Amino acid sequence: MTDCIFCKIVDKQIPASVVYEDDEMLCFKDINPAAPVHLLLIPKEHFDSLAHAKPEHEALLGRMMMKVPQIAEANGLANGFKTQINTGKGGGQEVFHLHIHIMGRPA
Ligand code: 5GP
Ligand code: ZN
């Protein structure tokens, strides 16, 4: 997936401000933040969108969702945050590598 900007971030071909990384997911700051804290959590494995997730991604998606509050708290959002997953052109998705937006204002 050499044309995918987020795969390039995973492969360190282009820089990003990474706030969390493990074997299967990466979280980094959105380059054009829509909130004081705006992070993107992605699987390292490329799939285009939530609509492209396969049954074998179910546990990974669950682990990503469970990681969101931990990442949010570590980035000043212990008081609360918004999550958003844009899916498909009709859903406002612009980068076709699944990602979870984590947004909020530190208390
Ligand atoms: P979408 O509309 O696809 O849900 O959101 C894509 C998000 O990726 C946007 O908020 C946009 O600012 C962010 N973005 C696009 N290109 C880059 C990039 O090269 N680096 C980073 N850190 N964020 C990006
Ligand atoms: Zn990708």
Image (spheres, grey):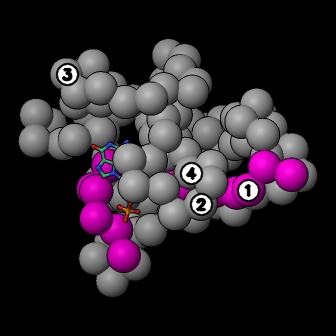
Specify the amino acid type for callout 1. Answer: Arg
Q: Which of marks 3 and 2 precedes in the sequence?
A: 3
Q: CA distance from mark 3 to mark 1?
A: 30 Å
Label 1 Cα neighbours within 10 Å, binned few <14 / some 14-19 / many ≥20: some
Q: Is ligand 1 less than 8 Å from the beta carbon at label 4?
A: yes
Asked if the residue under mark 4 is in contact with the one under mark 2, i.e. CB atoms within 8 Å, the reply is yes
Q: Is residue 36 magenta?
A: no
Q: CA distance from mark 2 to mark 3?
A: 26 Å
User: Would you name the residue on which mark 4 appears?
Assistant: 38
Asked if the residue under mark 4 is in contact with the one under mark 3, i.e. CB atoms within 8 Å, the reply is no
Q: Which of marks 1 and 3 precedes in the sequence?
A: 3
Asked if the residue under mark 2 is in contact with the one under mark 1, i.e. CB atoms within 8 Å, the reply is yes
User: Would you name the residue on which mark 1 appears?
Assistant: 105
User: Would you name the residue on which mark 2 appears?
Assistant: 35
Q: Is residue 80 above or below residue 88?
A: above
Asked if the residue under mark 4 is in contact with the one under mark 1, i.e. CB atoms within 8 Å, the reply is no
Q: CA distance from mark 3 to mark 4?
A: 22 Å
Residue at image point 27% right, 56% down: 96
Q: Which of marks 4 and 1 precedes in the sequence?
A: 4
Q: Quadrant of residue 12?
A: top left
User: Would you name the residue on which mark 3 appears?
Assistant: 13
Please give the range of residues in magenta. Answer: 92-107
Asked if the residue under mark 1 is in contact with the one under mark 3, i.e. CB atoms within 8 Å, the reply is no
